[in-house]
Image (cartoon, coloured by chain):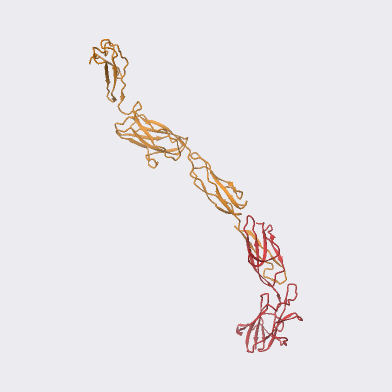
């Protein structure tokens, strides 16, 4: 089958109720293929739908694909270890700055991701954590409040985490950025 | 009686009596003016002749010569078909056929003893046929019986193979006393059982060719199928080819005739040709997701699904 056109859509629930069209409808080539290239997808999860419109002799059909567009996340910055599998060792009751950067595909900093970012902390049983990889967090003076902010000087997001006072406790922090990507950091507080 | 009686007679070798010379019958006196002569012979039916004297007895103006008294045998001498041939077709139970016992004059004559009539057919040389005692041609028979005091019997004939188209039937006295009779029956080709197409009623564009399913028809004639309406299909090697378009396509089956059957056509059969199903698969490159602002290529592939 080499005739007919394919339309590409972002979102929507079906070809009869499609989302935003991506590019223009493309005709099938001699291999029954059509393609479109885009760089305009927003960060986050997408449902991409290809709708074959059919011809006089062939019925329409469609296919869809869940696709994620994410920010480039280089790992948490000092004083945390960038490796999410490493347990960051610290002291209970201290405040540690949690820092990270987000970039686009060209290396440009994303500066607007405070909104849409969520941070959660869950307590873990320390015995469940591997202590093979640990890294003591250097003390760094925290500046600013405990509200997530963007530090445009250093092009980084900063969240000052005032740790609980309970000693010998372990935690997993989840920072979910607006692209719906979760980023994890493990802590053991003495 | 007032006339003179014959004084003497002669008899020939065949038993014919004759009067000659002075041995004549004459009328005399004023007696009756008619003379009835009766002839009788064993195995024959008696017969009479009446002679009328036109004059007076004295003049005896009337003379008679060669006044034969014909005597017919008293029983039947032959068999005869009395029902007219009625053309029929292969497989058809023909109208009843009647055979009669007759005397030499062709008059229906009752048999004086049970007579078995043997029935045979030449099968139209290369065809086939059989006799039956019932009008449904379900009870076959090869002979019929005429009981004493009756003069006919009826039976039925059905050809199952036409052959030359003429089936010669023979009725023969099993005792070989009566002369046999024959009659030719014309056997025509039969109409075939109703030919019909039963499938495919639905087809899908792009599908492999569909076999045509038929029912009915008779005989050994070749079967063929043709498109008789619409342009959405064609016939390739006897199958419905559906790569022409969608819509409705009318096809008709034809079955040739053979030695026994006439050719026939089916009614037109509608084939609905639907759009071919397709599948569309979608992939993305890079497949695992992309970084915001980067290019994503979406290469779907649409295929006809069989």
Q: Against B21, is A62 above or below? A: below
- The residue lying furthest to the right in this view is A153
Where is residue B221 shown, x and y percent of the image? Answer: 52, 42
Q: Residue furthest top?
A: B59
- For the residue pair A4 and B29, the one nearer the viewer reads as B29
Does residue B137 appear to the left or right of B197 in the view shown?
left
> Chain A appears in which tint?
red
Answer whether residue B83 is visible to the viewer in this image. Answer: yes
Rendering colour (chain B): orange
In the image, taking residue B47 as reference, residue A162 lies left or right, namely right
Q: Position of residue A33 (x, y in %)?
A: 67, 60
**Is B230 situated left or right of B192 in this image?**
right
User: Residue A6's quadrant in the figure?
Assistant: bottom right
For the C terminus of chain A, which image quadrant?
Answer: bottom right
Rendered image quadrant of residue B173: top left
Is residue B7 visible in this depiction of the protein? Answer: no
Examine the rendered structure and indicate whether residue A94 appears above or below residue B167.
below
In this rendering, the answer to whether B227 lies above or below A120 is: above
What x and y, as percent, mark residue A188?
64, 85
Please state, as top left, top right, bottom left or bottom right, where the N terminus of chain A lies in the image: bottom right
Q: Give whichever of B131, B243 is nearer the camera.
A: B243
Above-or-below relation of A103 to B62:
below
At which x and y percent is residue A98? 70, 83
**How many numbered tags mark residues here?**
0
């Amino acid at each position: 089958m080499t005739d007919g056109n394919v339309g590409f859509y972002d979102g929507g629930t079906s070809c009869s109720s499609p989302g935003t069209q991506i590019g223009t409808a493309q005709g099938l080539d001699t291999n029954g293929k059509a393609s479109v290239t885009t760089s305009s997808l927003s960060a986050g999860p997408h449902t991409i739908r290809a709708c074959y419109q059919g011809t006089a002799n062939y019925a329409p059909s469609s296919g869809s694909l869940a696709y994620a567009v994410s920010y480039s996340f280089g790992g948490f910055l000092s004083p945390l270890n960038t490796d999410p599998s490493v347990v960051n060792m610290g002291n209970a009751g201290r405040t540690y700055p949690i820092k990270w950067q987000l970039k686009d595909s060209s290396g440009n900093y994303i500066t607007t991701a405070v909104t849409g970012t969520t941070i959660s902390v869950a307590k873990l049983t320390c015995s469940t954590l591997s202590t093979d990889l640990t890294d003591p967090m250097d003390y760094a003076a925290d500046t600013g409040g405990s509200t997530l902010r963007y530090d445009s000087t250093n092009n980084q997001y900063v969240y000052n985490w005032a740790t609980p006072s309970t000693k010998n406790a372990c935690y997993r922090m989840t920072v979910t950025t607006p692209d719906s990507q979760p980023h994890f950091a493990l802590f053991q507080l003495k | 009686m007032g006339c003179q009686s014959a004084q003497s007679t002669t008899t020939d070798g065949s038993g014919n009596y004759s009067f000659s010379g002075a041995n004549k019958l004459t009328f005399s006196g004023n007696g009756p003016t008619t003379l009835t002569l009766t002839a009788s012979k064993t195995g024959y039916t008696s017969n009479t002749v009446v002679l009328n004297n036109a004059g007076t007895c004295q003049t005896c103006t009337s003379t008679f010569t060669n006044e034969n008294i014909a005597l017919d045998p008293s029983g039947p001498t032959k068999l005869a078909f009395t029902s007219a041939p009625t053309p029929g077709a292969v497989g058809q139970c023909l109208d009843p056929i009647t055979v009669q016992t007759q005397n030499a004059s062709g008059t229906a004559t009752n048999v004086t003893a049970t007579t078995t009539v043997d029935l045979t057919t030449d099968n139209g040389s290369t065809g086939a046929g059989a006799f039956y005692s019932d009008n449904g041609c379900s009870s076959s028979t090869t002979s019929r019986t005429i009981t004493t005091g009756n003069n006919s019997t009826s039976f039925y004939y059905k050809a199952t193979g036409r052959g030359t188209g003429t089936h010669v039937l023979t009725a023969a006295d099993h005792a070989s006393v009566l002369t046999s009779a024959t009659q030719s029956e014309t056997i025509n080709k039969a109409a075939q059982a109703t030919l019909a197409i039963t499938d495919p009623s639905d087809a899908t564009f792009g599908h492999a060719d569909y076999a045509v399913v038929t029912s009915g028809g008779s005989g050994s004639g070749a079967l063929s199928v043709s498109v008789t309406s619409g342009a959405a299909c064609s016939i390739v090697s006897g199958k419905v080819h559906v790569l022409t378009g969608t819509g409705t396509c009318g096809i008709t089956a034809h079955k040739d005739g053979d030695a026994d059957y006439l050719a026939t056509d089916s009614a037109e059969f509608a084939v609905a040709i639907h759009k071919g199903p397709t599948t569309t698969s979608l992939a993305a490159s890079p497949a695992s997701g992309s970084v915001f602002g980067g290019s994503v290529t979406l290469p779907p592939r649409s295929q006809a699904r069989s």
